[in-house]
Amino acid sequence: MKYATTLNDKTYIIEINDDRHIVVDGVEYAIDFASLAGQSLYSLLLDNESYESFVEEREEAWQVLLRGVLYEVRVADEREERLRKASGGLAVSGGEFSLKAPMPGLVVAVPVAEGQTVVKGDNLIILESMKMQNELKAPRDGTVSRVRVKAGDSVEHNQVLATMA
């Protein structure tokens, strides 16, 4: 099965051949991908390099925390991608968005305030987990409607940290 995977406004075509091999834009890779402890933490061996990441499915995208950077990844199978292209690629960009903790951790900083206007990519919360600081960024332009944490707060996985409209 082929998937159109969008990361940072660039789309990659990923084909899953079997449990141990994938093809990304025509280049084959040997992989080993496994959930650790049945949670959102995954181990990935990609061409003999080891990676650990938190991966969580959200309403419209996957959130992947890898090496201290939080990525928003959109995945569509071949059929969904054809339908999206046929409809002109219209996407809903409004509505309320709740930023949730991708893992348990400690809030290091909250560089935004309620009522503040932000643009896509602005830092909303800086969260420390596993001795790494993770910048949780705005997925789109909007206004911070509520900040639910402050620096020094301990948070749990999936806890709502802030909302934006």
Image (spheres, rainbow, N blue to C red):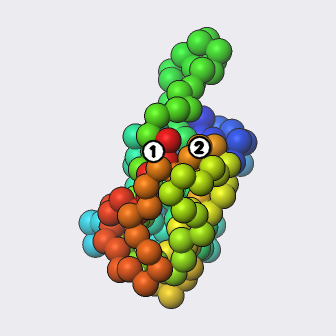
Q: Residue at x 60, y 35 (%)?
A: 4
Q: Residue at x 60, y 69 (%)?
A: 111
Disc 2 on helix, strand or loop?
strand
Q: Residue at x 35, y 80 (%)?
A: 154
- x%, y% of residue 81? 57, 24
Q: Amino acid at mark 1?
A: Phe
Residue 82, quarter of picture: top right
In this rendering, position of residue 85 left or right of residue 126 = right
| Residue neighbourhood size for the residue with mark 2, other residues' Cα within 10 Å, grouped as few (<14), some (14–19), many (≥20) | many
Disc 2 and disc 1 in contact, CB within 8 angstroms = yes
Most extreme residue toward the front is 115
Q: Nearer the viewer, residue 54 or 44?
A: 54
- x%, y% of residue 101? 40, 64
Q: Nearer the viewer, residue 148 or 89?
A: 148
User: What residue sits right under mark 2 in the picture?
Assistant: 142
User: What residue sits right under mark 1 in the picture?
Assistant: 97
